[in-house]
Amino acid sequence: MAKMITGLSQACVHAGLVFFGHQSNIYKQMKNLGFVLVIMIAFLTMESCTPIKKILLHFKNVNSKGHEQHCRIISASDTAELHTTKTVYIDRVGFQKGDTVVSIGVGSGWQEFLFSVYTDSIAFYLEDIDTSCITREKIKNKYLPHYSAIKGSNITNSFISAAGTDTSIGVKSNVASKIFILNVYHHFSDDMAMVRECKRILKSGGKLFIDEHVLNRNKDSFKFCDYGGHYKSEKNFVKDIVDVGLKCDTIYRFGKYWRIFVFSKQ
Ligand SMILES: C[S@@+](CC[C@H](N)C(=O)[O-])C[C@H]1O[C@@H](n2cnc3c(N)ncnc32)[C@H](O)[C@@H]1O
């Protein structure tokens, strides 16, 4: 009898060990599965640009199109920006008195005001889908006095604020002698619609300048969902724009990735 009880209790202990050992394996597997699920959900959340988007955009202080919302202003001590403006653009673009320039995605228009430090009698359309940094008041009361002080005399160029959309430019047809798209192209969610719009607003003989980074292959440009646009390879970039009917005149290459493309309307 005693032998039977001892045998039975040994069997129970063995069964318990097997059962709980098995349980702890299940627990471990469930823990691993939970971990994998959390990683998958976090990845999908980032990729699908939904709940985490607002938090990240809040910390980056940009709107849904990558527009920094602090209305950047360049000061006289920003010698690098002034130097780049002069040596990269002014010396290449060939601004002329009487030009009508449309700049797309200007943000605060700091680059166009720096152009105005070195040029005279040009009409600038400052265009963006978000015009909060280029209100008439800001242009008149803030930017014109500020950049005139850098120029050392009154800025003689005029500025018109224009609102666009993701697929349209808020300017009439055949008015622009020059168009700029500076550090903006990869923000376009429908770049081909924007290129067709450029063709529409360019005068015949007018030029389109695009300052853009190229990559070895086309790639989405959004980091944490904020743009919705994409970068292209140099070859694809040129081909897509030429297919719309503009001619590629020149490509200025700075290092491996930075390009200034010049297209014209025949
Ligand atoms: C990185 S900011 C560049 C601002 C300025 N050009 C600069 O270099 O500082 C990109 C700008 O493109 C604007 N943007 C994005 N898509 C646009 C579109 N389809 N038409 C006009 N502006 C657009 C955004 O609102 C934002 O102001």
Image (tube, helix red, strand yellow):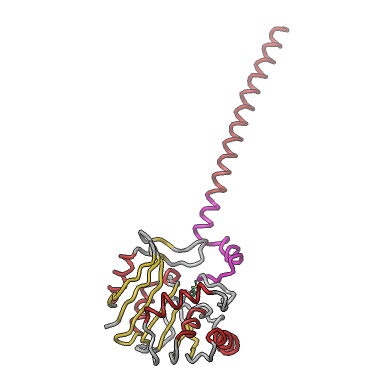
Q: Is residue 123 above or below residue 105?
A: below
| Count of numbered tags | 0
Segment colored magenta:
40-65
User: Image point 61% across, 65% down: which residue?
Assistant: 59
User: In terms of secondary structure, what is the magenta stretch mainly?
Assistant: helix
Q: Is residue 211 above or below residue 44?
A: below
Q: Position of residue 236 (x, y in %)?
A: 31, 65
User: Image point 46% across, 79% down: which residue?
Assistant: 165
User: Image point 52% across, 53% down: which residue?
Assistant: 43
* The one of 121 and 31 positioned closer to us in this rendering: 121
Q: Is residue 232 above or below residue 202?
A: above
Task: Tell whether position 26 is magenta.
Answer: no
Question: Image quarter for residue 266?
Answer: bottom left
Q: Is residue 253 above or below residue 15?
A: below
Q: Is residue 200 left or right of residue 32?
A: left
Q: Position of residue 84 (x, y in %)?
A: 46, 74
Q: Is residue 146 left or right of residue 237?
A: right
Task: Tell whether position 64 is magenta.
Answer: yes
User: Image point 29% across, 87% down: which residue?
Assistant: 204
* The one of 183 and 82 positioned closer to us in this rendering: 82
* The one of 129 and 150 positioned closer to us in this rendering: 150
Q: Position of residue 121 (x, y in %)?
A: 44, 92
Q: Quadrant of the N terminus?
A: top right
Q: Is residue 241 left or right of residue 19?
A: left
Q: Position of residue 189 (x, y in %)?
A: 43, 70
